[in-house]
Image (cartoon, rainbow, N blue to C red):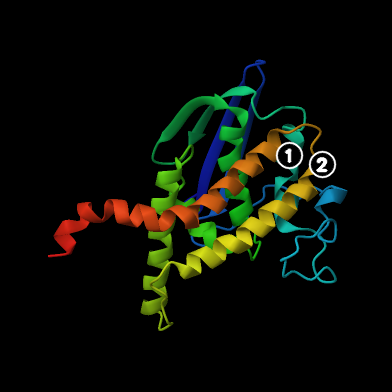
Amino acid sequence: MADQLKITYEFKLSSGLEKKFDIVLNKETLALIRDKEDTPPDWARLEFQQCSNCPLNTTLIRNCPIAANLSGIVHEFRDFTGPDKATVLVHVKERAYFKTCSLLEGLSPLLGIIMTTSGCPIMEPLKPMVRYHLPFASLDETVFRMISMYLVAQFIRSRSGKKPEWTLDGLSRIYEEVKKLNKDFGVRMRAAAKSDANIHALVKLNVFAVMVPIEAAKTLKEITASYSSYLR
């Protein structure tokens, strides 16, 4: 539909099994649209191993939005390990991506989409990245895209009459909270996963959360020369 954005992940596992996931988002807000409302498992209850920095109230909200939306994927990969090989195809409207890789490398960006579009207040600042989703991104690509997204956010704030923050301190603060969430959510996920594919995929996401603020200043320094025409 014209008002929806769809991202499809297809996994062809070395065992011969195939798994397909259609992620449908509201094109304007990038909020996740669920095709059916299954009853989430007990480990998805908000009060179960609730993240230490979670701002949601357990008396008002029954389920962790990330856990509720991830539960189906976690269940599908509960018997696999991170090093398992898979051929992963990712389809967006404009193009398709393809890679033969470890399962965790293909699963990690899929988890990232769900985590940022489920309505979790901690992950919400990362949601704009999903509009131009790039699976299998390297650390350098992720750093550049994240810096670009953050600075666009400051421009939008400025255009909206709000005070922008042109340093990357705000980006570092965002990732500090994301790192806390990833660590605590890993504890929650271990209650659901029989094996480690899901956990390894989450760990990979957290590695990026740790490295993006560290590498941001270095990346800006490295690319400055290519922006010489803007410095004249």
**Residue 107 figure quarter:** top right
Relative depth, front residue between 57 and 172: 172
In the picture, measured across the screen, residue 86 lies left or right of residue 99, that is: right
Against 108, is 114 above or below?
below
Q: Amino acid at mark 1?
A: Val
**Image quadrant occupied by the C terminus:** bottom left
Against 93, is 227 above or below?
below
Give coordinates of residue 62: x percent, y percent. 83, 62
Q: Give neighbour class at mark 2: few <14, some 14-19, many 20+ (Cα, 10 Å).
A: some
Label 1: which residue? 74
Relative depth, front residue between 229 and 225: 225
SS class, disc 1: helix
Indicate which disc, 1 or 2, sits on the residue closer to the N terminus: 1
Residue at 50% x, 49% y: name it: 5
Label 2: which residue? 192
Against 205, is 162 above or below?
below
Q: Can the viewer see residue 3? A: no
**Residue 220 figure quarter:** bottom left
Give coordinates of residue 32: x percent, y percent. 61, 54
Q: Are marks 1 and 2 in contact (CB under 8 Å)?
A: yes
Q: Give neighbour class at mark 1: few <14, some 14-19, many 20+ (Cα, 10 Å).
A: many
Give coordinates of residue 139: x percent, y percent. 45, 44
In the picture, measured across the screen, residue 80 lies left or right of residue 31, that is: right
Relative depth, front residue between 117 and 99: 99
Residue at 52% x, 42% y: name it: 7
Residue at 41% x, 77% y: name it: 164
Label disc, if present, on residue 123 of the rendered structure = none
